[in-house]
Image: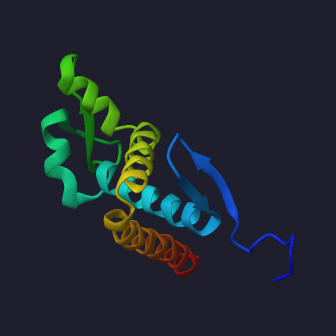
Amino acid sequence: MSYGQKPPFGKIGRLGAGEMDITWIQFFLMSLAIFRITRLIVFDQITAFIRAPFLREYEETNILGTKETYLEPHDGGIRGWIGQLISCYWCTGIWTALAVVFFQWQFPIIVDPVILIFALAGMAAIIESIIQTLISD
């Protein structure tokens, strides 16, 4: 690379008063990790026990006679607030992003492998979704 050229994965910014520079590849990996962690919190069966204290489950029978299960946040209080938060993908995503950026900034040596693992899992989920869509067509 000659003098004056930008590196292919140049830094996209500096966060806060500290020295956290983020490259495009780090941004991409963090985005995938945030996607995967958010889905884990909001949708995955393995974390249903975390959501259970904050959401009520009820069943209704649709017009075809099939039972459908719905989740709704508890009314009021801290349980209701957390229930609203974890039943909203967008809301949970913002708080997940905040946590990932904070921990990446404060503890990069510990958090880097965790971000990589969740990013790989996120990419695998995206690839699997694409394949399932192609197969079902």
**114 over 44 or under it: above or below:** below
Closer-to-camera residue (67/34): 34
Count of picture labels = 0
Asked which colour scheme the image uses, the reply is: rainbow
In percent of width and height, residue 20 lies at 52, 53
Closer-to-camera residue (107/24): 107
Left or right relative to 123: residue 66 = left
Quarter that holds the C terminus: bottom right
User: At x 75% / y 73%, what residue is drawn?
Assistant: 7
Q: Quadrant of residue 93?
A: top left
Quarter that holds the N terminus: bottom right
User: At x 55% / y 65%, what residue is drawn?
Assistant: 26
User: At x 19% / y 17%, what residue is drawn?
Assistant: 77
Q: Quadrant of residue 4?
A: bottom right
Closer-to-camera residue (56/136): 56
Left or right relative to 55: residue 36 = right
Left or right relative to 2: residue 110 = left
Q: Residue furthest front?
A: 3
In percent of width and height, residue 92 lies at 39, 41
In percent of width and height, residue 76 lies at 22, 16
User: At x 21% / y 19%, what residue is drawn?
Assistant: 75
**114 over 106 or under it: above or below:** below
Q: Residue furthest top?
A: 76
In percent of width and height, residue 82 lies at 26, 31
Left or right relative to 6: residue 54 = left
